[in-house]
Amino acid sequence: MSYIENEATNRRDFLGKIITGATVLTMPSFVPLNLQAAFSPEKMDMGVENPEAWVNKIKGKHKMVLDVVRPHDILPFAWPKVFLLTNAATGTPEKECCVVVVLRHDAIPYAMKSELWDKYKFGEMFKADDPATKMPAVRNPFWEPKPGDFKVPGIGDVAIGINELQASGVLFCVCNMAITVYSVVAAQSMSLDAAAVKKEWIEGILPGIQLVPSGVWAVGRAQERSCGYCFAG
């Protein structure tokens, strides 16, 4: 299947979950979302910082946006580091570069604390394996990893934890649309209140990661800021 066909299939699958009520957990029923009401200006929780203000941080000589729609081993976190390292090797230090990582669709759990991974079984729900155990993750493996956690053949240890990338100026954001949809899915599967689950997920977003209206919104804003585009899985 070509990249374009694969992306079209992914979008149809995601929209189908919203429109028809099909879910990743194949639950027998799904309460339809009133998306117009959920995303009205007075009801959208955009976190501490306005997302448009966050967009203004996208600056630099060389800029790239990584579009992350699903878990893809270490690649969504290795590629920002590769971009910075290879620009430094060709004469542009990382302080003059900017990488934006957009966590959307099935990649949203990487924006959240390990406690939520354990409680909501994100590894199983989003088919996200722990690189260390090769089993469904019960923690966020890319938040504050230990030295030596990640190795690349021919290179050795690489510092690709989210906190480590943030220290190098990498900007992260997470899709509020996907959180809205999947928090309902999780709530129904566990017989919990959907509004409470969404609130807990938003409060559990990692420090420095910006909540944005949608992942595609963020990809579009980044490209308006002259970021090159890279599909990261």
Image (tube, rainbow, N blue to C red):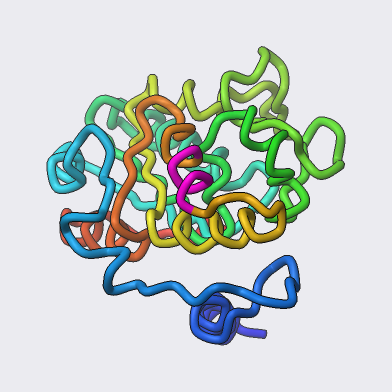
Quadrant of residue 227 within the rendered picture? bottom left
Q: Which residue occupies 56% across, 52% down?
A: 107
Q: Which residue occupies 45% across, 34% down?
A: 205
Q: Which residue occupies 35% across, 28% down?
A: 208
For the stretch drawn in magenta, the main secondary structure is helix
The quadrant of the picture occupied by the N terminus is: bottom right
Q: Is residue 164 left or right of residue 173?
A: right
The quadrant of the picture occupied by the C terminus is: bottom right
Residue 7 versus residue 106 in the image, above or below: below
Specify start and end residues of the magenta stretch as a single range: 195-200
Residue 108 versus residue 94 in the image, above or below: below
Tell me if residue 196 is in the magenta stretch: yes
Tell me if residue 107 is in the magenta stretch: no
Q: Residue furthest top?
A: 147
Can see residue 60?
no
Instruction: Judge by depth and name the residue closer to the eye, 13 or 227.
Output: 13
Residue 28 versus residue 133 in the image, above or below: below
Where residue 167 sits in the image (x, y, percent)?
Answer: 38, 20
Q: Is residue 176 left or right of residue 13?
A: left
Q: Which residue occupies 43% across, 42% down?
A: 199
